[in-house]
Structure formats: structure tokens, C-alpha cells
Image (cartoon, coloured by chain):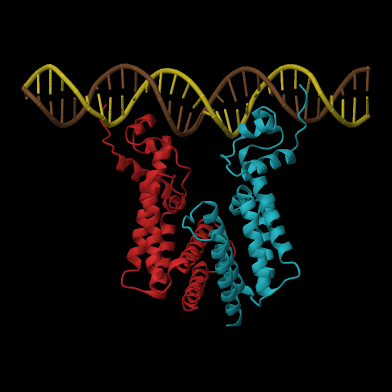
Chain colours: A red, B cyan, C yellow, D brown
DNA sequence: CCACTTGAGCTATTGACATTAGCTAATTGG
DNA sequence: CCAATTAGCTAATGTCAATAGCTCAAGTGG
């Protein structure tokens, strides 16, 4: 029995790669084990079952998305920050469909790490909103609007719901432009 | 063996009720059969397996959502139509989470009924957009924007992603108001 | 360098679920 | 009232997650 040399990180990252593949089938431990050259029950030495695996993927994905958002807004403020962040958000989601879907999963109540990762995303959004002068409940409304727009667009795009023959990039750019104007307007009222 | 008297419609409707329950567990034929007082394999006399059941639910849900949207816009035009339709959309989605999720599933290519049901929703949206003077590619962009906003908001709300303590209704109303203004502005440029 | 401990990976098993095959009896139509 | 249909059944197969218990590979202390 030569050892495969797995670790928690190796297993989780392999799962991430699987769910991000273009024509990914639903994630199964059987398929994951096969890919790692190991029998299915052996995975339990490194993860605590399917739920734990999904949770790990979600926490990591949330932190990564928050990082992508934050980096895209470095040195920018106001509408430019929102635009740049939105473009990065959509790009990352398109490149990592499986992980993106995981970012939407609400944390189990009491799961501190998952909750912290979720808040990380909100924090980045808050900072961007404050750079256009929105605070308090106004900022919350704006963040919800921004998330709804981005999540909705990205999800529908990934699901193939935009069947009509028209340029999707253009639709996104126009939506984004409208959103930026709307939020800016919002800040001055 | 007294007969249970099932039909395709009875089975599908029971499944719809199950997935719309507040704390619905994932749909299984086992649970569905139990609820109908029948053994699991008996369901195959009325449906063609799990995929067929899901497809039926999706087609019916799309048609119902299209109807809800259309009825809410009767006798209205422009911003009022968009607002009314959006409120109904959100309300229906909240009341029927399982069916709503089914409306997003893209049709299998070549499935005429499912494709027709999907287009039904788009058609209603097109008519509303034309009532504010948007046509062609502009209308497509506007429809995508509207769907993204509504779908994103509704999905995040259902998923419990709006954890912050602020009134969700208010956030939706403001987002909607901004959207209406944005689209109207769009129509005149 | 060797005994010892640890634990990675294995086989075997159970239980949930979808699906298919084939039987039986309730229903229906002539 | 008989014959054809078919709703619902039991039995069996295959996939997958999960648990129990074994074994040997790999490090560690002496």
C-alpha cells in the first residue's frame, strides 16, 4: 500500500477544481476519490464528510471572492470602484462557477469561520459604498442592490438563461452604468 | 389492493406542494410516494422518473410565473407596470420558493414545451418594456437588467443572505425605484 | 538501528435513494 | 360477464454517503 499523501488542503482543492470544470457533474465523494487515486472511504481521514467538504469550499470561496473584490478596488473610489469591482466579480464568477455558487450558501448559525468569511464580502462592499458617501441604512440598501444585481446577472448568465441573441457584455456594461448613476444619485438625496 | 387513484397531475402537484413548504427537504421520490400513500415504484406509472418530474414542475412554474407577471401589469404601463410586476414577482417567489427555483432551470435543448414556457416569461417582459418605449436590443438589455435585479434580490432573500438588520422591504422598494428611473432614462437617450 | 506508536488507506457493510422487471388484481369497455 | 388494460405491488440492481475495524507504512524515542 503506497500512500497517496493526501491532506485536507489537497482534497479540498481537488474538489474545487472539479466543481469549476466547464461541464462539471454534481460533486460526489466517489468521483473525488477516484480522481485522487484513492478509495472513497479514505477521504474521511482528511474531511469530515460531504457537508464538511462543502463548508470548507464555501469558506475558502467567500474569502477568495472578498479578496478579488478588494484588490480590484484598490486605489479607486466612487463609481470607478464600483465598476471595477463589479467587472472583477463577474469575471471571477464566470471562471469559477462551482466556487461562486458556494459563496451564496448562508453559514450555519454558530459557524464562526463561515460567518466571518461572509462578513468579509460585506465589509468590502461597505467600504466601497462609503467612498461614494453612503452610510448606515442607505449603505445597506445600496449593498443589497449591488449584490442583487451582480448575483442575479451572474447566475442567469451561468445558467444559460440569457438565450436571446444579443451581446451579454454590452447588457452588463449598460446595467452597471445605470447602477452607478443610480447609486450616486442616491448618495446626494 | 385498493387503488390510490393517482394521475400525473396529482403527483406533480403534490411534489410542488412539498418543495414549496417552508422548511422543505430536498425532493425525493421516496418522500413523495409516502405522502401519496403509495410505494415508491408506483410513481413510475404516472411520471417518467425524477428528471421528468422536475421538468414538469419547471414548465408549469414558468407558465404560472408568466401569468402572475402578466396579470399584475394589466391596465398599467411604463413605470407603474414595472413596479407592479416586480412586486408580484417577488411575492410569488417568496410564497413558492421551490417552484420559483424551478423557473430558472434552462430548458433542455429541443424541449419545445419547456422552451415555450421560458419564452412566455420573456414575452411579458418585452411587452412591458415596449410600454416605456424600449425596443430591440435596448429592450433586451432592459429585460436582462430587470431579471437580474429581481432574480438576484429574490434569491438572496430566500437564501437568508440579507443578514444585516435592516428592513428588506424598504431595500427592495428603493432598488425598484432606482431601476424604474434608470430604465425610463434609458428609453429617452 | 530497532521497537513502538500513529494514522493513512483499505475492505466490508449498512442504509437511503432511483430505477427496472415482472406479478396481481382492480377497473373498464364491449 | 368476460377480456383487456393498467395501477400498484414486491423484488432486485446500482450508485452514493457513511461507519467499523483491519493493516501496514512512516515517523519517533531509545
Instruction: Locate residue B76: give its quadrant.
Output: bottom right
Q: Position of residue B155 (x, y in %)?
A: 54, 55
In the displayed structure, would residue A25 be above or below residue A162?
Answer: above
Left or right side of A52 for D5: right
Instruction: Locate residue B53: give its quadrant.
Output: top right
Left or right side of A71 for B124: right
- Residue plotted at (63% across, 64% down): B86
Is residue B168 visible in the rendered image? The answer is yes
- Residue plotted at (64% across, 76% down): B134
Q: Position of residue A73 (x, y in %)?
A: 35, 68
Which quadrant would the N terminus of chain A be assigned to in this image?
Answer: top left
In the displayed structure, would residue B158 be above or below residue B183?
Answer: above
- Residue plotted at (36% across, 52% down): A116
Q: Position of residue A37 (x, y in %)?
A: 34, 35
Q: Nearer the viewer, residue D21 or B93?
A: B93
- Residue plotted at (71% across, 36% down): B46
In the displayed structure, would residue B175 be above or below residue B37?
Answer: below
Left or right side of A155 for A81: left
Specify the farthest residue to the bottom. Answer: B189
Query: How many numbered tags mark residues here?
Result: 0
Q: Position of residue C19 (x, y in %)?
A: 61, 33
In the displayed structure, would residue B188 be above or below residue B60?
Answer: below
Is residue A84 visible in the rendered image? The answer is no
Amino acid at each position: 500500500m503506497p500512500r497517496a499523501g493526501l491532506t485536507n488542503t489537497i482534497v479540498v482543492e481537488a474538489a474545487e477544481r472539479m466543481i469549476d470544470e466547464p461541464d462539471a457533474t454534481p460533486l460526489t465523494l466517489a468521483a473525488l476519490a477516484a480522481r485522487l487515486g484513492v478509495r472513497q472511504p479514505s477521504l474521511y481521514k482528511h474531511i469530515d464528510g460531504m457537508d464538511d467538504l462543502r463548508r470548507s469550499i464555501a469558506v475558502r470561496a467567500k474569502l477568495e471572492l472578498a479578496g478579488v473584490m478588494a484588490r480590484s478596488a484598490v486605489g479607486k473610489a466612487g463609481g470607478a470602484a464600483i465598476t471595477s469591482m463589479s467587472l472583477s466579480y463577474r469575471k471571477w464568477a464566470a471562471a469559477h462557477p462551482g466556487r461562486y455558487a458556494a459563496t451564496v450558501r448562508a453559514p450555519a448559525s454558530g459557524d464562526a469561520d463561515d460567518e466571518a468569511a461572509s462578513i468579509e464580502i460585506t465589509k468590502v462592499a461597505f467600504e466601497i459604498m462609503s467612498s461614494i458617501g453612503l452610510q448606515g441604512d442607505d449603505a445597506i440598501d445600496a449593498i443589497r442592490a449591488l449584490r442583487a444585481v451582480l448575483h442575479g446577472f451572474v447566475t442567469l448568465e451561468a445558467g444559460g438563461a440569457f438565450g436571446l441573441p444579443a451581446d451579454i457584455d454590452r447588457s452588463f456594461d449598460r446595467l452597471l452604468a445605470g447602477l452607478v448613476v443610480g447609486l450616486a444619485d442616491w448618495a446626494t438625496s
